[in-house]
Amino acid sequence: MGVHAKAMAKERIAELAGRALDLATFWRECSAAIAPAVPHYLGPCWFTLDPASLLVTSHFQEGMEEIPREWLAQEYYSDDYNKMADVARSERGVATLHEATGGDPNRSPRYQQAIVAYGGEQEMIAGLRTCSGEVWGALGLYREKGRPLFDADDLDFVRALAPSLAEGARRALLLGEATQPEGPEAPGLIVLGADWRVESMTPGVERWLAELPDGDWDDADWDQGRLPSVVQAVAGQALRTAAGADSPGEIAFARVLSRAGRWIVLHGAALVSDGSRRAAVIVEPAHPARIIPLLMAAYQLTDREQAVTRLVLQGSSTAEIAARLFISTHTVQQHLKKVFEKTGVRSRRELVGKVFFAHYEPRVRDNEQRVAQDLPLRGGPLTTDA
């Protein structure tokens, strides 16, 4: 029964990842798929993380409309075990609190406050990484007292699900930004029918289409469905992979050089409803992470100081930062000293906490309100001009 349930869950989640679902729906459907395969207490706790900083951008759990602020403070200001970013950065990408604490979860400052107080005893955290290595979220599963420990099979199973869960989260966030854009660089969305005609498109997507190599959109005849060839190719991939490929989200994807000399990324997703098959194609610029201009605007950090800060937010050590940036550890420390002065903090932990609570907690709270209003969720930090 356990093996069959796990196989069914894996197949179901891979199928869900290939569809253009809003994020709350995707999490609800995935929760239902996981429940028979990995018994747990209450509902799964889902998070999205900004791949550039590994900071939380949204939280979703049935029955908990708002994540307590003290939990977030514990995550970003306290020294603790089994933190989401640490697990997501680890080679295995999944861990339990019992493992991390050597079998004594009471060593974790948040154990009594955030787990035992809610009737739980065990915690499993998994980072949601795509096959290309980008982290788009985290999953928390819990068990109550008296239940068997999460075992190696449970961890291996959740680890195997992570790429599909990450892909589904990534696609859902892109869909949310395309349908309700926050700025001129927001993604665009095109929906194609089975006859390849354009059924709908979001405002501004023409701009991205016109930049594609054969995107003669100004002269295109909409009724005839003239679209750039790469759009049709990605749409076709999405529809084919929806029929049963193991990793649908990893196939319906293209990266092309625009006429203007910048990279544009296209993502395809299948839409299946009322027996009809359609394809959604999301088009976005391959722009730098939004945390970079935010750090410059808010704190006037230099390019190198921004690069160091981004790696600090991800949890990188001084030696890791030095290796990534090809500089000495002494130079890293000098950059950090300048960053601390400009941001008004005294330590790495304070820096992470300040950036999170100034720019990411507002996004978390905005997304909680959006779930309550059945609106699409968004990723990345919340900027002042959003």
Image (cartoon, rainbow, N blue to C red):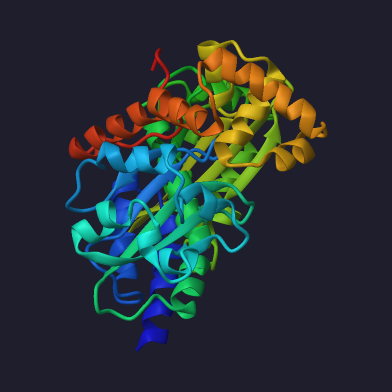
Picture residue at 38% right of the left edge, 64% below the top: 105
Spot the residue most to the bottom.
1
Total marks shown come to 0
Is residue 212 visible to the viewer in this orientation of the structure? no
Quadrant of the rendered image containing residue 175: top left
User: Which residue is nearer to you in this view: 187 or 109?
Assistant: 109
Is residue 360 visible to the viewer in this orientation of the structure? yes
User: Whole-percent x and y of residue 41?
Assistant: 24, 68
In which quadrant will I find the N terminus? bottom left
| 325 relative to 234, above or below | above
Q: Is residue 81 left or right of residue 35?
A: right
User: Which residue is nearer to you in this view: 2 or 139?
Assistant: 139
| 212 relative to 70, above or below | above
Picture residue at 28% right of the left edge, 32% below the top: 365
Q: Is residue 303 left or right of residue 71?
A: right
User: Whole-percent x and y of residue 7?
Assistant: 43, 79
| 313 relative to 135, above or below | above
User: Whole-percent x and y of residue 109?
Assistant: 36, 51
In which quadrant will I find the C terminus? top left
Quadrant of the rendered image containing residue 362: top left
User: Whole-percent x and y of residue 43?
Assistant: 25, 61
Q: In this view, does 177 lie to the left or right of 267?
A: left
User: Which residue is nearer to you in this view: 317 or 64?
Assistant: 317
| 201 relative to 17, above or below | above
